[in-house]
Amino acid sequence: MSNNLNNSAADNYFSLLGLSINFDVDKTKLTENYHEIQKSIHPDKFANASDLDRRLSVQKAAQINDALETLKNPIKRSIYLLSLYGIELGENDMSVDPAFLMEQMELRENLSEVNNTDDPLEELSNILDDVNARIKQSIGNLSQLFMKLLSDNESDDNAPLLKEAKEQVLKMQFLNRLQEECMNKEEDLADQL
């Protein structure tokens, strides 16, 4: 695991879209830059070009699309930022504190019991509000952690901050899955009405 940001990749998603490396991105600028770049490399502009140039245009357009999708989503952006530090998240990586896991179990239990309450939609709304507040808090925590990491990139020991950022990303993944479960439950309840 590297403690320093890997700046060797000139074509990181941030530079591809004309942004500085940062957790907090200006979504308007991100979208504007994306559209400008897409116009300049759109495959239609290379219709009369060589096969190689057309292929390169398609590849670049796909890369720009991937960059946009990654940078506009806080979880994907966090995972990408961690990857720039050489940290990859495994699919079964569950290294979060046990207290958080217990909270998740309680929230899921509350969600499973929603149908047994007097007002299931109201109870579901309360759970969803709680989950959304936790996601917002996680995004704020990640913003602060990456701000510290990126401002202190010269430090030889960013390992504690990187570990904390990784754990925060894992927590946010749990919360996003729970948010999706709440939304699915909401659809199920609406169908029952």
Image: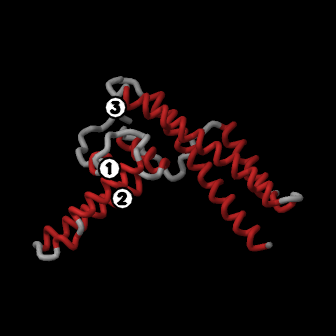
Which of labels 3 and 2 is toward the front? 2
Quadrant of the rendered structure where residue 111 is? bottom right
SS under mark 1: helix
User: Who comes first in sequence, dot 3 or dot 2?
Assistant: 3
Tell me the kind of residue under disc 3: Asn
Q: Nearer the viewer, residue 17 or 11?
A: 17
For the residues labelled 2 and 1, say whether their Cβ atoms are less than 8 Å apart: yes
Q: Quadrant of the N terminus?
A: top left
Question: Which residue is at a point 27% across and 38% down the rendered structure image?
Answer: 7
Q: Where is residue 82 in the image (x, y as percent from the top left)?
A: 41, 41
Q: Looking at the image, which residue sits at the far bottom?
A: 48
Tell me the kind of residue under disc 2: Asp
Q: Where is residue 121 in the image (x, y as percent from the top left)?
A: 78, 60
| Circle 1 residue | 13
| Circle 2 residue | 66
Question: Which residue is at a point 14% across and 68% down the rendered structure image?
Answer: 53
Question: Which residue is at a point 69% across and 49% down the rendered structure image?
Answer: 129
Depicted 47 relative to depicted 139: above or below: below
| Circle 3 residue | 4
Q: Which of 172 and 156 is in front in this view?
A: 172
For the residues labelled 3 and 1, the Cα–Cα distance comes to 17 Å
Few, some or many residues within 10 Å of mark 3 (<14, 14–19, 20+): many
User: Who comes first in sequence, dot 3 or dot 1?
Assistant: 3
For the residues labelled 3 and 2, the Cα–Cα distance comes to 24 Å
For the residues labelled 2 and 1, the Cα–Cα distance comes to 8 Å
Question: Which residue is at a point 79% across and 56% down the rendered structure image?
Answer: 122
User: Who comes first in sequence, dot 2 or dot 1?
Assistant: 1
Q: In which quarter of the image is the C terminus?
A: bottom right
Q: Is residue 160 left or right of residue 179?
A: left
Q: Which of 3 and 132 is in front in this view?
A: 132
